[in-house]
Amino acid sequence: MSIISLVAGSQGSQDSQGSLEGASRALKADIARGFGNARSTYESASRLQRFMGNTMLQKLYTRDAVQAYSEVLDLGCGTGWFTRKLAAMGQVGAVAGVDLSRGMVQEARENSSQGIDWIVGDAEHLPLPDASYDLIFSNLMIQWCEDPRSVFRECRRILRPGGRLMVSSLLDGTLKELKDAWGAADPEHEHVNRFETETALHAKVYAELPRATIETRTIRLPYTSPMMLAGELRHLGAGFRGAERRKAMTAPGRMRNMCGYYPKEPDGTIVASYEAVWIYWQKR
Ligand SMILES: C[S@@+](CC[C@H](N)C(=O)[O-])C[C@H]1O[C@@H](n2cnc3c(N)ncnc32)[C@H](O)[C@@H]1O
């Protein structure tokens, strides 16, 4: 269970990535570092991630999907929660987990007692051979990628004929209550990550994955307060990663101001909306 680093230029660095230049490279390093720093708190905060990944796992048990998978890839595996689930499924051969964040991959390796291959790599530029996997599972990773289309293209390339792809992500409208509250409290600065619109994502999916099935659903999670929501995002390593990030954005006064604008339920609790999307495709 060694960790293979397949990210060009990652030698000796904590969390870095390949041949991309400038801002894009810095943003990826920031994303990898953010998740790496959250490696020990991530699983305690990942209720949305569990729900979305379990939705895909259940599809593997539907009648037309039950089959033997000799090579399985968990793309953007994080701490390996679902990689371990995939490895524990019956009729599965070799399983590998890939993640941009070396810290996450280390956590996944430490959490795992099975013979899983762990790879530090970028889903947009996978240095994996053509036609080498029967199943690719990717839970809540592509929304962190600059160009989801390149991820779909890579998945199509590394899947064998007949291989299956299952991907989940989040769409525009996700965390809209938080975005609006920050918009009122601190209108000059962005505080919430941007998500693709459904129309834009559909175009990218169908350009690379003809006849893919796309399912969407709004998920509304309850929180005791906006502070609890902010804490969950921090524990996930999923904080705002925009280039214009304000260094002091969590200053207590500013945070309190945002909380004042966040819509409350009659009992004082709050809700955060997530626009969930699942993409299913089988290579001919
Ligand atoms: C929200 S976590 C999901 C982790 C895991 N799939 C789960 O369901 O618990 C997103 C993961 O995607 C990884 N990630 C982000 N951009 C990536 C990229 N370009 N290539 C590979 N992994 C990436 C992050 O490091 C992080 O571990």
Image (spheres, rainbow, N blue to C red):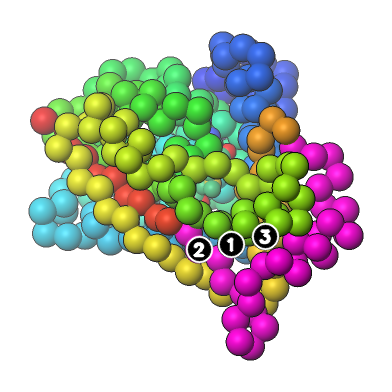
Q: CA distance from mark 1 to mark 2?
A: 7 Å
* Residue type highlighted by circle 1: Glu
Q: Are marks 1 and 2 in contact (CB under 8 Å)?
A: yes
- In magenta segment, residue 266: yes
Residue at numbered disc 2: 273
Is the residue 253 above or below the residue 10 in the image?
below
Q: Earlier in the sequence, mark 1 or mark 2?
A: 1
SS at mark 2 in the image: strand
Q: Are marks 1 and 3 in contact (CB under 8 Å)?
A: yes
SS at mark 1 in the image: helix
Name the mark nearer the viewer: 1 or 2.
1
Please identify the quadrant where the C terminus is shown.
Answer: top left
- In magenta segment, residue 261: yes
Residue 22 x, y percent position in the rendering: 66, 14
Q: Residue at x 68, y 52 (%)?
A: 183
Residue 273 visible somewhere in the drawing = yes
What number is the disc on residue 181?
Answer: 3
In the picture provided, is 4 more to the left or to the right than 280?
right
Residue 246 x, y percent position in the rendering: 80, 39
* Residue type highlighted by circle 3: Ala
Q: Nearer the viewer, residue 134 or 38?
A: 38
Residue 130, image quadrant: top left
Q: Nearer the viewer, residue 45 or 39?
A: 45
- Badge 2 local density, few (<14 within 10 Å), some, or many (20+)? some
Residue at numbered disc 1: 177
Q: Which residues are magenta?
A: 245-274
